[in-house]
Image (cartoon, rainbow, N blue to C red):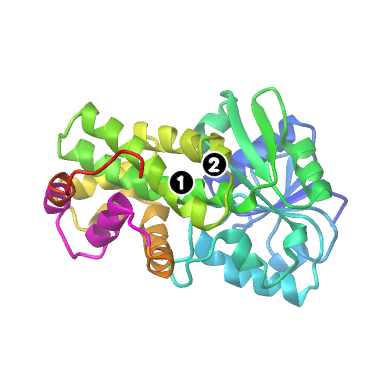
Amino acid sequence: MSATDAIIVGAGSWGKALAHTLVINKKKITIYSRNKENNSQNISKINNIDEVFQNKSPVIIATPVNSLKEIGNIIKKNNFEGPIILACKGIDAETGLFPSQILSSFTSTNNLAVLSGPSFAAEVIKNKPTAVTIASSNKNVLEVFTEMFHSKFFRVYASNDIIGCQLGGAMKNILSVAVGISDGLGLGPNAKAALITRGILEIKSLGEMLNCNDRTIYGLSGLGDLVLTANDDLSRNRSFGLEIAKGLSIKEAEKKIGHIVEGIYASKGLNILIKKHSLNLPICSKVFDIINGQISPADAVNELLVREQTKEFV
C-alpha cells in the first residue's frame, strides 16, 4: 500500500464524512471497506483489514461500538502501536465500557484519542460549519489528529479529558431517545427543555463518579452534542424515540430507522454503570426500561411526572 496520511476503518456515512473532511485538508486517505467498489478518485480503498494495521499510518475508527472487540483483536495480532482515534460514540452493552476502555485491552491508552461533538455526517459532507472535540492523554497523539482534522469548516478543540468526551457522546443518544418519546407523545417544548436540562445533570452525575471535568460536560461533546441530537430530525435516536412513542415495537422502530441506533445499546451499557456506582439517573433508567419492554412510553412518562419533589441541585 502506498504512503497515506491516515486510514479510516468504517465506510458508513460517518467514515465517509471524515474522509471528505481530510481530503479537503489535502490529506491522502485510505478507507477500509468490505465493498470492493471505489467511487472516489481521491480516496484509496483496501478490503483486507489486516492491511490497516500492518503499517504505521494513523488509524481512524468510525464503526459501531459493538465492533471494537473484533478490531482490537486485529490490532493486537498485528502488534500495531500507531496513533488511533475513535470516532464512535456509545457504551458497550455487555461490559459498560467506553470505546477507549475497550481498545485499551489491546493497545496502550497512550496510543488513543477520541473525537466527539455535535456533528451530523450529512452536514459535514455539505461543508456546513462544525465544531468538535478531540481528546487524548498523549500530547503527541493529540497533535497528530488535531492538525489532521482542523479546518475552516471542521473546527477542532483539544482536550485531555478522554472519558469525559466519550461520556457525553454516549449518554446524549439515550437522552435523545427520551426527547423523541416526549415529542412523539405530544408533551410539548416545555417538556423537551426540561428533559435536556435534567439530562445534562444526569451526564454530570456519572461524570463526577468517573472523575470527568465539569467543563467537558458543558462543552461540545456534552451539552453541544445533546442539543443537536435531541432537536433535529437527522438524529436516529430522536427518530427512534418518536417511532416507539407512536406504538412501534423496539425491533420495528429500529428497522424503520434503517441504521444502528446506538442509544439502544448505550442504555444497556449505562445500566451496568448505574448499578456499579449506585446512581439515580431517572430519565436514562426509564429509557432502559422502555427498550427492555418493562414499561410503556406513556407509563414511563407518568412515573417521571409523579416523582417526589426535590431540590434542583442536590
CA distance for labels 1 and 2? 7 Å
Q: How many marks?
A: 2
From the image, tell me which residue sits under label 2.
214
Residue type marked 2 = Asp
Comparing 299 with 194, the one in front is: 194
Asked if the stretch drawn in magenta spans residue 194, the answer is: no
| The N terminus, quarter of image | bottom right
Q: Residues within 10 Å of mark 2 (few under 14, many from 20)?
A: some
Query: What is the magenta range?
Result: 279-302
Chief SS of the magenta region: helix
Mark closest to the chain's N terminus, 1 or 2 = 1
Q: Residues within 10 Å of mark 1 (few under 14, many from 20)?
A: many
Q: Residue at x 60, y 52 (%)?
A: 62
How far from the left and from the top, in percent, is residue 111? Answer: 77, 59
How far from the left and from the top, in percent, is residue 203? Answer: 44, 47
Q: Residue furthest toward the bottom?
A: 77
Q: Residue 204 carries which label?
A: 1
Identify the secondary structure beneath mark 2.
helix
How far from the left and from the top, in percent, is residue 201? Answer: 39, 43
Are the residues tagged 1 and 2 within 8 Å (C-beta)?
yes
Q: Residue furthest toward the right?
A: 3
Left or right of residue 298: residue 44: right
Residue type marked 1 = Lys
Q: Residue at x 64, y 24 (%)?
A: 153
Left or right of residue 236: residue 32: right
| The C terminus, quarter of image | top left
Measured along the vertical axis of the image, is residue 147 above or below residue 210? above
